[in-house]
Image: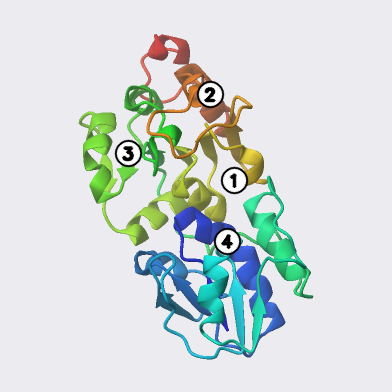
């Protein structure tokens, strides 16, 4: 079985319930996932996938005549054409019989698609196997586009208020941003597997609408997620110890500058959300109240 999901970290994790539904429906099949090679560490943690086929975006897929090809990538037509080119015996994709529904939550979208082909999925089946606790508070300031990137200065204020257990994280390319937010404190940029383990064992994650938010959901780590141009009804955590902060307006998710609604979320609000998820009370290392820290 060939499954196409050649996107990012969060995209992959929202497809886990669909992948598990496929595994249950075809227990004897080899499930081959066409996805970017850099996601190997997370693919290895998904029990529904047997093999990663490195596929960087919408490019020809190196697979011949699978019994079943499944389009968990998008609505087509390019993704559908690439799967048809592998000459599958059967193809599952959006189309005339299963129209694309705008505004649907990403987890539900792929479960709904498979349900139309008689494959049952549980949208709540998102969890990855647990990892040891480490007590960290993860602050992840990066995002793929500026529209979803809360200002570094505000992340720095949050990191200072949350105390000595904070670890600021990011990709190697984001190291300047990570250092700016950490301001001499602990930070980590590096391998994806290490980031996954850090988030899995953390007691709190504070981040924007990005892949790390979905990692927190996958491991049940309490999280405060800051949304800007995209509604959490489409990409946010659906249940569990998570709080999504959003001003209720959609915008351009590909814009270079922070979304106006995202900028309306202030430091006080983020710290209050963090306290509510961790039992309230002052954070160790904070010199004063959240309001004083933001002012």
Residue corresponding to mark 3: 168
N-term mark: 2 or 3: 3
Assign a secondary structure to mark 4: loop
For mark 2, what is the residue? 261
The mark that comes first in sequence, 2 or 4, is 4
Reading the image, the residue beneath label 1 is 235
What's the CA distance linking mark 2 and mark 4? 27 Å
Residue 118 in view (yes/no): yes
> Residue 151: x, y in percent?
37, 26
Residue 150 to residue 22: above or below: above
Asked whether 102 or 105 is in front, the reply is 102
N-terminal of the pair, mark 2 or mark 1, is 1
Q: Which residue is mark 4?
A: 74
Q: For marks 4 and 3, give the one nearer the viewer.
A: 4
Mark nearer the viewer, 1 or 3: 1
Q: Kindly indicate whether the residue at mark 1 contacts the one at mark 4 (C-beta within 8 angstroms).
A: no
User: On the rendered image, what quadrant is the C terminus found in?
Assistant: top left
Which residue shows up at 61% across the image and 39% down it?
A: 232
Near-viewer residue (249 or 185):
249
Q: Is residue 181 above or below residue 288?
A: below
Q: CA distance from mark 2 to mark 1?
A: 16 Å
């Amino acid at each position: 079985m060939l499954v196409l999901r050649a996107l990012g970290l969060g995209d992959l994790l929202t497809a886990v319930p669909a992948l598990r539904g496929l595994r249950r429906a075809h227990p004897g099949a080899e499930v081959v996932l066409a996805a970017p090679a850099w996601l190997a560490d997370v693919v290895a943690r998904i029990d529904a996938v047997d093999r990663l086929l490195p596929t960087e975006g919408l490019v020809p897929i190196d697979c011949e005549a699978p019994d079943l090809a499944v389009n968990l990538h998008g609505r087509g037509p390019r993704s559908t054409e690439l799967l048809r080119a592998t000459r599958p015996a059967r193809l599952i994709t959006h189309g005339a019989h299963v129209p694309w529904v705008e505004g649907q939550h990403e987890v539900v979208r792929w479960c709904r698609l498979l349900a139309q082909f008689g494959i049952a999925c549980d949208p709540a089946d998102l969890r990855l196997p647990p990892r040891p606790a480490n007590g960290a508070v993860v602050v992840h300031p990066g995002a793929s586009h500026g529209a979803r990137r809360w200002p570094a200065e505000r992340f720095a204020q949050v990191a200072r208020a949350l105390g000595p257990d904070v670890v600021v994280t990011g990709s190697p390319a984001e190291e300047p941003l990570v250092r700016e937010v950490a301001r001499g404190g602990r930070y980590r940029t590096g391998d994806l597997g290490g980031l996954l383990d850090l988030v899995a064992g953390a007691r709190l994650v504070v981040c924007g609408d990005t892949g790390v938010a979905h990692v927190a959901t996958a491991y049940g780590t309490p999280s405060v997620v800051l949304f800007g141009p995209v509604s959490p009804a489409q990409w946010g955590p659906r249940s569990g110890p998570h709080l999504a902060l959003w001003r209720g307006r959609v915008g351009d998710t590909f814009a270079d500058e922070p979304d106006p609604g995202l900028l309306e979320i202030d430091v006080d609000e983020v710290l209050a959300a963090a306290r509510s998820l961790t039992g309230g009370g002052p954070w160790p290392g904070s010199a004063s109240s959240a309001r004083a820290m933001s002012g």
